[in-house]
Amino acid sequence: MTREEIFQRIEELKSDYVRIQADVEKATAVGGSIGQGEKVLQNIEEELRKLRKMLDVSYE
């Protein structure tokens, strides 16, 4: 992955994260199930960590 591709993927993930977080908050407000949403958020957070590490390595 190029640095540009990494930055683009990070932006996509951040957008997805905000959208899913809003869905989880709505589900919480109405007493819905949030387990799947929370799992997706955790997966996004993990991918973001990996991408940021890739950027750190590319700076060295």
Image (cartoon, rainbow, N blue to C red):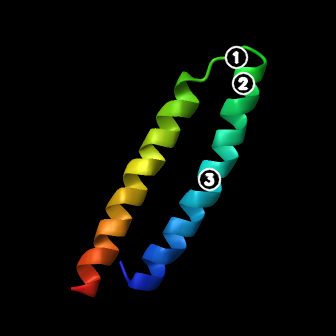
Q: Position of residue 59 (x, y in %)?
A: 28, 85
Q: CA distance from mark 2 to mark 3?
A: 16 Å
- Residue 33 in which image quadrant: top right
Which SS class for mark 1?
Answer: loop
Comes first in the chain, label 1 or label 2 = 2
Q: Position of residue 35 (x, y in %)?
A: 53, 23
Quick one: label 3, few (<14), some, or many (20+) residues within 10 Å? some
Residue 5 located left or right of residue 12: left
Residue at 57% x, 32% y: name it. 37
Quadrant, the C terminus: bottom left
Q: Is residue 52 above or below residue 55?
A: above
The numbered dot on residue 27 is 2
- Residue 20 in which image quadrant: top right
The numbered dot on residue 16 is 3
Residue 26 located left or right of residue 46: right
Residue at 50% x, 68% y: name it. 9
Please, what is the three-letter code of the amino acid marked with disc 2? Ala
Residue 9 located left or right of residue 2: right
Q: CA distance from mark 3 to mark 1?
A: 20 Å
Which SS class for mark 3?
Answer: helix
Q: Do callouts 1 and 2 mark residues in contact (Cβ within 8 Å)? A: yes
Q: Which residue is mark 1?
A: 32
Comes first in the chain, label 2 or label 3 = 3
Quadrant, the N terminus: bottom left
